[in-house]
Amino acid sequence: MKIFYRISDKSYDKSKLIGATKEVCLMNFCKAFAGVVFEGFDPSDKSYVPPMRIIADNCERKTIKMLNKTGLPVTLTSEGNAGSFRKAFEMALEEDDNEFVYFCEDDYLHLGSAPDLLKEGIKRSDYVTLYDHPDKYTRYYNGGEFSKVIKTASSHWRYTLSTCMTFGAKVKTLREDKDIWLDDELTGKDHPHDHFIFTKIAEKNRRVAVCIPGVACHVDMTFSGTVNYMLMEQWAIDMMVDELSNELDDIQAKLPQEEKAKWRNMRGSLLFEKTGQGRLLALDALRHQIKKT
């Protein structure tokens, strides 16, 4: 498996799941894919090339410094969203036909089962995604997508019409579909038109499989705002609750003893009987309040 991870400091200004910063998403990815990213790593082997490459598009010095700390190869670009994808795509085509490639954007969280599920899914489909897009369960698809559902050793899968730009495929498939992926109308402007790309691919009788439930979560809150209710995997919310809880622990540990007791009591009162999104919002409010003092 080869991974091409795209990150940018000039992303669209969209509301994100609280706590899911670009750094948090990257660290989560490296943890979930540790068995892939560091497979065969030998610090004494100077010729070793990690299977994960980062494409840093329009990134500031602070972000580049953070990326360099991972020890992974970083390619700097200033091409924009669509242009950086094209760069990642062209880099993927340098691999052997039988190689499996996973493209990932910088605003996704993953569970640890993600790498194994990608390997399972690609055996049953041309393209595979781990993100069970909530739009497929809304009025845009009459409440649900009509499709065939299959089962592998670890998951159920649904064949779906489209997904976002975080997906996997064999290099041979990408090469055969190159005319679509590099179509100027689809990836030659400001951003890739993912939905239209995959509908074009479907015209070639290609299939896209998504694991259900999803083990990747897009932390973009835009679609939740569109339908006016929360559409986010519960495990992703819980993951960010843990993230903010740990951050608060670190902040409180540095406070004077009398302040620690004050904020500990306030934290207990504020979080009482709160779960999920409510708990995440309460932790975020407490975090901002402590930082003001």
Image (spheres, helix red, strand yellow):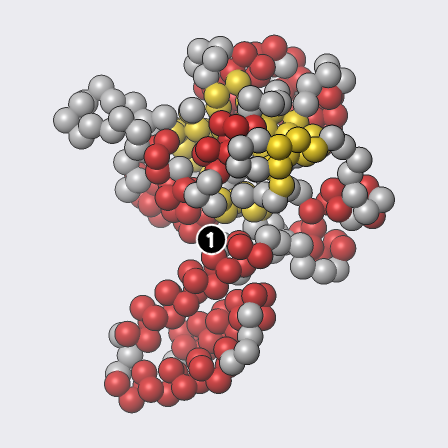
Residue lying at 55% horizontally and 78% vertically, measured from the top left: 273
Residue lying at 47% horizontally and 76% vertically, measured from the top left: 286
Between 66 and 103, the residue placed more toward the observer is 103
Would you call the spot at circle 1 few (<14 residues within 10 Å), some (14-19), or many (20 or more)? some
Quadrant assignment, res 231: bottom right
- Residue under numbered circle 1: 21
The correct choice, above or below, for 292 with respect to 277 in the image is below
The residue sitting at the left extreme is 44
Taking the image as shown, residue 35 lies to the left or right of residue 235, namely left
Between 136 and 200, the residue placed more toward the observer is 136
Specify whether residue 139 is in view: yes
Q: How many marks?
A: 1
Amino acid carrying label 1: it is Thr
The image quadrant where one finds the C terminus is bottom left
Element at badge 1?
A: loop
Taking the image as shown, residue 243 lies to the left or right of residue 10, namely left
Residue lying at 49% horizontally and 10% vertically, measured from the top left: 97
Between 231 and 116, the residue placed more toward the observer is 116
Specify whether residue 162 is in view: no
Quadrant assignment, res 82: top right
The image quadrant where one finds the N terminus is top left
Taking the image as shown, residue 124 lies to the left or right of residue 264, namely right
Q: Position of residue 118 (x, y in %)?
A: 51, 30
Q: Position of residue 134 (x, y in %)?
A: 69, 47
Residue lying at 33% horizontally and 86% vertically, measured from the top left: 261
Quadrant assignment, res 177: top right
